[in-house]
């Protein structure tokens, strides 16, 4: 309920009428949670949206991969990168769903964040893909400003 209320308060422009309706419905539900409890939880850095928090953690991990390797062509065959490679593949699948008009958790904000660091939406041929200097430089500049 409070997450929905916060989202409604923070978003000036929510374009999807169904999303507005759902957020308003959720915000109106009674949970017994007082404003004081919310304030105390906020003071302890309580995670109100664990799904978004998990996505941001993986995104930051991906940014570290890019910083260390100079490219975004992550493959699961690289030792120690299986979970991160799977996360990247999920982003690609969600991107294809979004393009096809299907429901997905990949927001435009997330797409923009990934594109700013040079994320490869099409990973075909990555085994032979040499990162371009310009893409590496652009990704490096973005990473320095986000990490």
Image (cartoon, helix red, strand yellow):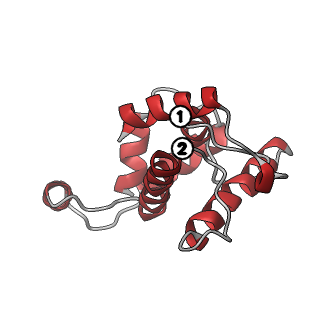
Q: How many marks?
A: 2
Residue 26 place in picture, x, y as percent: 47, 56
Q: Nearer the viewer, residue 41 or 50?
A: 50
Residue 56 place in picture, x, y as percent: 45, 53
Instruction: Answer above or below: position of 84 versus 2.
Output: below
Q: Nearer the viewer, residue 86 or 110?
A: 86
The residue shown at (15%, 61%) is: 44
Label located before the other in sequence (2 or 1): 2
Q: Is residue 123 visible in the rendered structure shown here?
A: no
Residue 144 place in picture, x, y as percent: 38, 34
Which quarter of the picture shows residue 133?
Answer: top right
User: Please, what secondary structure does the residue beneath circle 2 have?
Assistant: loop
Residue 51 shown left or right of residue 96 in the figure: left
To which residue does mark 1 refer?
Answer: 139
**Screen quadrant of the N terminus:** bottom left
Q: Which mark is residue 70?
A: 2
The residue shown at (43%, 37%) is: 143
Residue 97 shown left or right of residue 28 in the figure: right
Q: Nearer the viewer, residue 50 or 61?
A: 61
Q: Is residue 42 visible in the rendered structure shown here?
A: yes
Residues packed near mark 2 inside 10 Å, few (<14), some (14 to 19) or many (20 plus): some
């Amino acid at each position: 309920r409070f997450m929905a209320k916060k989202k409604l308060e923070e978003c000036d422009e929510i374009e999807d009428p169904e999303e507005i309706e759902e957020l308003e419905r959720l915000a109106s539900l009674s949970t017994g949670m007082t404003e004081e409890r919310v304030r105390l939880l906020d003071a302890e850095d309580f995670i109100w949206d664990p799904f978004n928090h998990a996505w941001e953690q993986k995104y930051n991990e991906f940014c570290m991969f890019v910083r260390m390797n100079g490219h975004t062509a992550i493959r699961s065959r690289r030792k120690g990168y299986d979970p991160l490679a799977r996360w990247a593949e999920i982003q690609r699948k969600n991107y294809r769903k979004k393009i096809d008009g299907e429901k997905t958790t990949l927001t435009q904000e997330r797409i923009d964040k990934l594109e700013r660091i040079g994320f490869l939406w099409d990973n075909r041929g990555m085994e032979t893909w040499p990162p371009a200097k310009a893409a590496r430089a652009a990704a490096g500049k973005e990473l320095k400003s986000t990490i």
